[in-house]
Image (cartoon, rainbow, N blue to C red):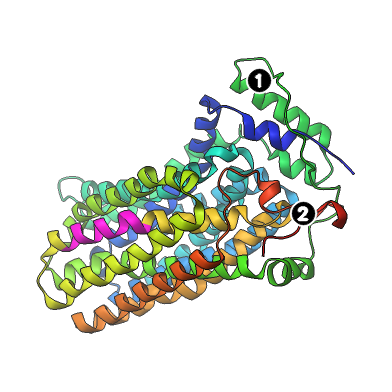
Amino acid sequence: MLRSDIPARLDRLPWSRWHWKLVLALGVAWVLDGLEVTIVGSLGGVLERPDTLAMTAAQIGWSGSLYVGGAVIGALVFGRLADRVGRKRLFLVTLAVYMLATVATAFSTGFASFAACRFATGLGIGGEYAAINSAIDELIPARVRGRVNLAINGSFWIGAALGALLSLVLLDARVLGPELGWRAAFLLGAVMAVAILLVRRHVPESPRWLLAHGHPQEAERVVAGIEAAVHGGSAATAPARTLPPPARRATVPSLGEIAHVLLRRYPQRSAVVLALMVSQAFFYNAIFFTYALVLTRFYDVDAARVGLFIFPFAAGNVLGPLLLGPLFDHVGRRRMIAATYALSGIGLALTDIGFVAGTLDAVGQTLAWSAVFFLASAAASSAYLTVSEVFPLEMRAIAISIFYAVGTAVGGFAAPALFGALIETGSRANVFVGYVIGAALVLVAAVIALRWGVDAERRPLEEVAPPLGLRPRERPPPSD
């Protein structure tokens, strides 16, 4: 039975330049996802033109759903591998998959090839979520884990703003124009991925994962290197509280073991995570994948100017996790998750009454949604934070994958296709029904989170969810 102070040494480190580099190298996964989603959202009207791909609104919606479907499969496949072969290998592989698929998207010739490339791009992004969330939580000090995780997840909207900017510049007739501009936008996303791939090579493997897989010497070497980097060249010498790490395991947990942990040991945690993931996936994908179509169909916004309306929307989504994130560490996870989910649902319902009544113009609708998603962005980010910290280390990546996949499949896959069809009818009332569904889902999730959420703030991961490798007599009783 191995015992180590490595988890405590990681948690006690002061915030440093090394942590900023880690956030930059790994957090870009959400920037890339935001870039991809926004490019397609901003280009929705352009892709309907006969001189581009001549797609219908329904086909654009299905392309969004296939992207999400690819992300679901990618999360499951790569998440399992991240627990088996390590975080680092996977966050290099998944970024490479994304990069190649994005390049291929730029050379699409019609709906079929475009949809296939979007599916492949989703494979890479889905794998990123599992590997990256695991690595970040295992390397970030416990006292700031909540705010850092939320800020990183909120960086999706930095990518969204970047995608909007690219669409505005590249679609301009004085630059490339619609016919070539949309292709260049995807190529530039791939260029960004290449740059980040070079940075990620220097991110170490998770020491917690190394311990769990019987490599204590390597884990010690990695932690000593991190301490040296943080403390300016000399490892820390202050004593650390000893915590029991996982016992040595020959393999990752079997599917049966995983099912037992999710359904028998932590059933309430599983219910909370499922509610959070399904509701936020529907809430976001319902609106954002068809954002451009709503503006062009109901507010007569020029397709080439849709990017302008993304900026305030993106600003609200970035600022939400940044400003509210510290409260998740101080006020607490359970109360803040419930509050942000509930207020998001109420805000969406009130805002969309104005939509169906026709009292808002394009600017008013955008500003109203920006205010709602200031809260919703923190809420959605907290769903990923929750799933990444309430299950044992040996199955952390696959747990993230499972709930991301189920939540996204139920809430994310259906939403773009559903709303594409609703928008196609041209009826505000029909679209409003979809928004009401989204609001109701997050309100239900708020109640579930308040009742059964886990108070994981400022606690070591090994305390929130004891490793499976601990012998039963050494394992603290479960919280559920």
Q: In this rendered view, identify the residue nearer to me: 191 or 7.
A: 7
SS state under label 2 = loop
Q: Position of residue 403 (x, y in %)?
A: 58, 66
* Residue 63 visible in the displayed image: no
36 relative to 89 in the view: left or right: left
> Residue shown at 38%/77% (left/top)?
417
SS state under label 1 = helix
* Snapshot quadrant of residue 305: bottom left
Disc sitting over residue 228 in the figure: 1
Magenta stretch: dominant SS? helix
What residue did someone put label 2 on? 476
Q: In this rendered view, identify the residue nearer to me: 332 or 108.
A: 332
Q: Quadrant of the C terminus?
A: bottom right
Looking at marks 2 and 1 on the same chain, the residue that comes earlier in the sequence is marked by 1
Three-letter amino acid code at the position of disc 1: Ala
Q: Position of residue 39 (x, y in %)?
A: 33, 56
256 relative to 91 in the view: left or right: right
Instruction: For label 1, count other residues whose C-alpha is less than 10 Å away and answer few (under 14), some (14-19) or many (20+).
Output: some
Which portion, as a residue range, is magenta? 365-376
Taking the magenta stretch, the answer to whether it contains residue 375 is yes
Nearer to us of marks 2 and 1 is: 2
Q: Is residue 326 above or below residue 351?
A: above
Instruction: For label 2, count other residues whose C-alpha is less than 10 Å away and answer few (under 14), some (14-19) or many (20+).
Output: some
Q: In this rendered view, identify the residue nearer to me: 27 or 293.
A: 27
* Residue 369 visible in the displayed image: yes
